[in-house]
Image (cartoon, helix red, strand yellow):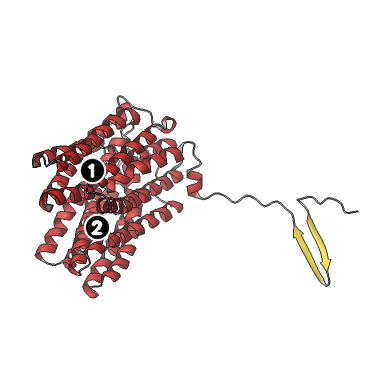
Amino acid sequence: MPQPTSRDTRLFTVTADTLVAVDFTRRAPREPGPYRRLFEVPGSRAFTAGNLLARLPMGMFALSAIVMIAGSRGSYALAGAVTATGLAATAVVAPWTARLVDRHGQARVARPATLIAVLGSLALVLCVRFDAPAWTLFAAYAATATTPNTGGMSRARWAHLLKDRPDALHTANSFEQAADELCFMLGPVLAAVLCGTFFPEAGTLTGAVLLLTGVALFTAQRSTEPPAVRRAAGRAPLRAPGIRPLLLVCLATGGVFGSMEVVTIAFADGQGHRTAAGAVLALQAAGSCVAGLLYGAVRLSGSAWARLPWCLATMAALMTLPLLAAALTGSLLVLAGALLVAGMATAPTMVTTMTLVQRHTPEGRLNEGMTLAVTGLLGGIACGSAAGGWVVEHVSATAGYGVPVAAALIAFTVAGTLRSFGSSNRWMDHRPHH
C-alpha cells in the first residue's frame, strides 16, 4: 500500500531504463524586487496614487494656456508672456508655500493653496471666454503660482518613512523622478488632445479637476504625512552649506531641458514636421523614465556627491548625440533615436541631485529645500528656452543643439566644485552617505 510522501523528501522511480527523481523540497520564496518592497510600506500606494493624479496637470497647464490664449487672441507672444509671468510668480511663491507646508503640515497648507490655484485657472478660463482685458490674463495665471509642489511633498513622505533605509530611499527617489518624466510626457499630449478634440478651455478645466482631486486624495493619507515642525532648529535651506552649489546644478540642468525643447520644435518645424515635435520630445522623456526605474533598482556604492560628477559627465557626453544626429544626418527619425538615448542620462542625474538636496536640507525644512530645487530647474528651463531660441533665430536649429551640451558642461563644472566642498565640510561629514 503506498505511503504518504513528505514534501521534504525526494521520490525516485524507474521508467523502462530511466531513473526519474522528483524533488518535493519546498523552495525558498523569491525575494521581492526593490519596487515591490518599496510599495509594501504601509500607506505608500495610497499617497502615491493621489500624488500622481495631482502631478499630471503640471505638464498640462502651460500648453493648455498657450492654446487657449493664442486661439482666442491670435497672439502667441501674449500667450508666451502670460505663461512666463506664471513661471516667474511660481519661482517667488513656491518656496514660501513649501515653508508653510513644513511648519503647518502638508494637508493644512496644500488644500487651501490648491484651491487658490484652481480658482486662478478658472478665472483664466473666464477671462479668455469673455474677452477680458489682457492684464486680467496675467493676474489670473499668476494666481496659479500657489500650486503646491506635489512631487516635493511625495519625496518628503518617502524621506520620513525611509529615514533609516538609504537604499530604499534611493529607489523611492528614482521612482519619483520616473513619475515626473511620465507626467511631463503624458501631460502635454493629454492637453493637446483635449483642447483639439473638444474646446480650447478643456485642457485647463480638466487639469484643474485632476489637481484638486489628486491633492485631496494625497493629503487624506495622514498616516504617512511627515510631522510639522513649527520652529525648525536649522537655518533656512538657501543658507545651508551645499545647497547653493546644488541649486546651480539644478539651474544648469534645467537649461538642458528648456533648450532641448525649443530647439527640437524648431528643428522639426524646419523639416516640415512641426506636429511631430511632441512625439520626438516624448521619446527623450521615455528614455529618462526607463533609466530612472533601472537606476532605482541598482544597489549603488559610494556617496551621492561622488556619483554626481559622473552622472553629469555622462549627460554632457550623451547630449552630443542629438547635435551629431542633426548636423550629420538632418533626419528627424535619427534625431528621435538620439534623443531617446540622450534622455537616459537625465533621470540618474536628477535622482542624485535630489538625494543631495535632501541630505543637505536642515531638519524640518525638507519641503522648502525640495521646492527650491524645483524652482532652480524652472529658472534653468526659462533661461535654456531663451538661449536656445536665440541660437535658433540667429544661427540655426542644428547649432541650437550645442546649448544643452554647454548647459550640461556648466553643471559638470559646478558639480566638481560641490565635490571639493563636500569632501572637506564638517557639516556633511557627520551625516551618513547614501
**Residue lying farthest to the top in this orientation:** 230
- The amino acid type found where label 1 is placed reads Thr
Q: Which residue is mark 2?
A: 408
Counting from the top left corner in percent of width and height, residue 259 is at 20, 57
Quarter of the image containing the C terminus? Answer: top left
Question: Is 338 above or below relative to 187?
Answer: below
Q: Nearer the viewer, residue 421 or 307?
A: 307
Of residues 168 and 100, the one drawn nearer to the viewer in this rendering: 100
In which quarter of the view is residue 238 placed? top left
Query: Left or right: where does residue 272 sit relative to residue 357?
Result: left
The answer, for residue 239, to whether it is visible in the render is: no
Q: Where residue 298 sits: x, y (%)? A: 45, 54
**Marks 1 and 2, how far apart in space?**
18 Å
Q: Residue at x 14, y 45 (%)?
A: 82
Circle 2 packing at 10 Å, graded few (<14), some (14-19), many (20+), is: many
Q: Image check: 194 left or right of 4?
A: left
Q: Which of the two marks, 1 or 2, is nearer to us in this view?
A: 1
Going 23% across and 37% down the picture, which residue do you hit? 94
Badge 2 amino acid: Ala
Which residue is located at x 57 percent, y 50 percent?
A: 31
User: Which label is found at residue 3?
Assistant: none
Q: Which residue is mark 1?
A: 375
